[in-house]
Image: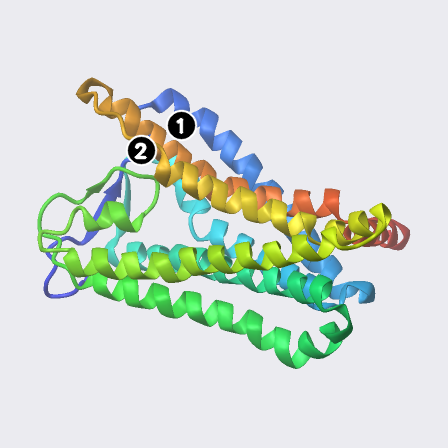
Amino acid sequence: MEVTNQSTVAGFILLGLSDHPKLEKIFFVLILLMYLVILLGNGVLILVTIFDSHLHTPMYFFLGNLSFLDICYTTSSIPLVLDGFLTPRKIISFSGCAVQMFLSFAMGATECVLLGMMAFDRYVAICNPLRYPVVMSKAAYVPMAASSWVAGAVNSLVQISLAVQLPFCGDNIINHFTCEILAVLKLACADITINVISMGVANVIFLGVPVLFILVSYIFILATILRIPSAEGRKKAFSTCSAHLTVVVVFYGTILFMYGKPKSKDPLGADKQDLSDKLISLFYGVLTPMLNPIIYSLRNKDVKVAVKNLVTQNCFVQ
């Protein structure tokens, strides 16, 4: 395997759950089922947003992008995880590790930006409904979605480029299911200060800024809804953004739980802590993509009708 001249490792070993062989079979089945739900649920949402003319609006265009993004995000890591359950101490090449890191990092950053774009769409729809067709025209929302993908890819390219230039000349065992970038950086036999600073700046831009943007948008949305005189009007206005708000809470809530929970100071509990961290990270990667289509299907009448029509048409054709 040919790698950069600064590196002496040809690849990495992914530990996964190799220390817990009984758990591997259980989690293989569980993660496989969740992955199939992700593919089916998000695949159906993509189809209805494409083929149902009633859903050819900015909100559902963003939703289609979100569903495609979730499929890409999980596909960049879940097949590797499943293979690791069947092959203890899975070996992945240096270039393969870099590609996997790039894809998962790019998809994560893109989703953060895309959720912010969706919040802006809901803000305009509720706070400035008369201007909505002009502000959220096709000439506006298509570039907005495209810029989310470009921003995520550029950010990932910067972070991964900095990471692969580091020399990896010692331990090549990654105590994780995939090439998680922080786990990989720990193996570098060089100063990673630049990498840490770069990732810190990226977190502020791709996590902090969208969260602040979404928060401000929903403050204005809530203020507008509360000024609606009728209870039925308030309920109808809130229903148009409740699914997006639920997705935002689930997405950022799991991130805060994963990175904000206190670390154990008990040395005897280090193994349990590592196992807990890995499993939380694993389920974070599949939980949100699995819940997104469920949330939008349950909380959105238009999507329910579109899915029902799609199923009915397919049954009729058969």
Give left or right: position of 121 versus 29.
Answer: right
According to the image, label 2 marks what residue? 88
Q: Amino acid at mark 1?
A: Glu
The x and y percentages for residue 315 are 86, 49
Residue drawn at x 17%, y 61% is 194
Q: Is residue 281 above or below residue 158?
A: above
Question: Label 2 is placed on what type of residue?
Answer: Pro
Q: Tell me the residue that label 1 is attached to.
A: 24
Residue 296 at x, y percent in the picture:
69, 48
Q: Nearer the viewer, residue 221 or 67?
A: 221
Sequence-first disc among 2 and 1 = 1
Q: Element type at marker 2? A: loop
Task: Residue 274: name its quadrant.
Answer: top left
Residue at the outermost right position? 316
Label 2 to label 1, Cα distance in Å?
9 Å
Find out whether the residues at labels 2 and 1 contact each other: C-beta distance under 8 Å: yes
The answer to whether residue 181 of the structure is visible from this angle is yes
Residue 27 vs residue 50, the one in the foreground = 50
Q: Is residue 24 left or right of residue 8?
A: right
In this view, 104 is above or below 262: below
Instruction: Identify the secondary structure beneath mark 1.
Output: helix
